[in-house]
Amino acid sequence: MHRLHWATGPLRTFVILSIYFVLLGLPLLLTQTDDGVVLEITPEVATRFLVVTVPMTVITVGVGLWTWLALRFRVDGDDLVVETGLLRKRKRRIPLSRVQAIDVVRPLVTRLFALAEVRVELAGGEQSEIALRYLGRNTAQQLRAELLARAAGLPGHTPEAPERPLWRVSGGALFGSLVLRLPVLGTALLLFVSLVLLLLYAELGMLAVAIPALLGLVRAVVAPMVMYGAFTVATSPDGIRLRYGVLETRMQTVPPGRVQAISIVEPSLWRPFGWARLDVTVAGYAGERQALSSVLLPVAPRQVALHLVAQVFPGANVDAVQLLPASSKGLAGGAASAGTDDRVFVTRHGHLCRRTDVIAHARAQSVRLTVNPLQRLLGLATVHIDAPPGPVRVAAADRDLGEARAIVESTARRAQAARAAGGDPGRWAAR
């Protein structure tokens, strides 16, 4: 059995004590006087502070030690075994052939101590993540390589697969892509106008407009710059490797066959530059983790994005798929189209922000036809090609009813044939 890095306990203690000092410890050192609240260390104040702080320190040290002792893990054959608890022990045995993704995450504080967190994502929703906080940086890299090798059906001592860099997102391109969006430009204009009115007319009511607009820009521009800074994508035999982050660095590896669906996003202001973004649905991610890991490529030339799609869905050529427009009777009109070939099903929709949704036939979990009241009157239907829950939902809207039924039948046959030919995506290197 292996334990976490010994610094895990002290680090957890430091974090808890820091929160305690900010919320309670510092107020204990403040004294109310006639001149207001001041920081004045008197015997009475020091005693009050120590009476609370000393027991709190003992408790947090115990919590940190308990955290370190309570988790053990080992690799047993093709399984990852994780034991938790001291008084009441719990053992989980996870078949590595079912691992959906393996991430190595390094928050800012842990980078100072050369530590890293290994997250093993499994299919099954919110409680399916195995988080090993924290391991030494080199130990985390070695464990990641061993888990990926065993998940592929190779011996655990197999060296890490070499990678081929595909694209690095420059800071200028990332900033430009975040700014050149209609909602962002509209918010920036609103902020500018509100500040001008505030300065010219001293109208403090404009703060009610300026502050939310400023916070919106921080969330839409600054936060993604910090999250996706230094973004690189590479391909390797063990999957797609992503590295990104300024304050919290993340190394994400998605094994072959785990990406369920892809969306090529092209806002109208990006098209003169030929830019595109790739959003994905990855099996195993759920809830907040799905939202944080839904971007396969934040911005890149469209040809680079299409090349990456072909790496994820081998043999797919999205531009070669003939897309037929939806019925002119429906609300989608000329903005929606759909098409298929032997490998993928493709839909396209949107005027101001064009989205091209792609799903491999082997990844389709079900094919269904829906008809809303308006479509029933017009003789139309929508065909849905279902994947696991995620940001990408593939649907061909407003097709003539006969055409929709034909699409359902043909797509179901193609999906069945593709799954039979592709086999189980687990232990892909042993096939």
Image (cartoon, helix red, strand yellow):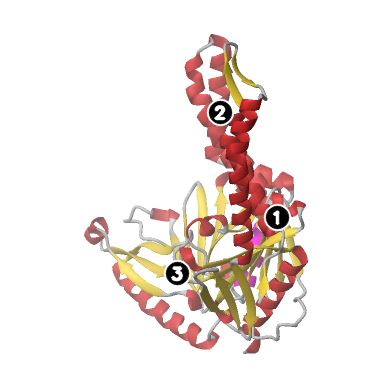
Answer above or below: position of 123 versus 155.
above
Q: Main secondary structure of the magenta part?
A: helix
Frontmost of labels 1 and 2 is: 1
Q: Secondary structure at mark 1?
A: loop
- Mark 3 — residue? 387
Residue sitting at x 49%, y 83%: 419
Q: Does the image show residue 422?
A: yes
Q: Which quadrant holds residue 133?
A: bottom right
Answer above or below: position of 180 versus 71.
above
- Mark 1 — residue? 231
Q: CA distance from mark 3 to mark 1?
A: 27 Å
Give neighbour class at mark 1: few <14, some 14-19, many 20+ (Cα, 10 Å). Answer: many
**Highlighted range, magenta:** 302-312
Camera-side residue of 160 and 170 = 160
Question: Sequence-wise, which precedes: disc 3 or disc 1?
Answer: 1
Residue 160 appears at what percent x and percent y? 76, 76
Camera-side residue of 175 and 152 = 152
Quarter of the image with the C terminus in it: bottom right
- Mark 2 — residue? 189
What's the residue type where badge 1 is placed? Phe
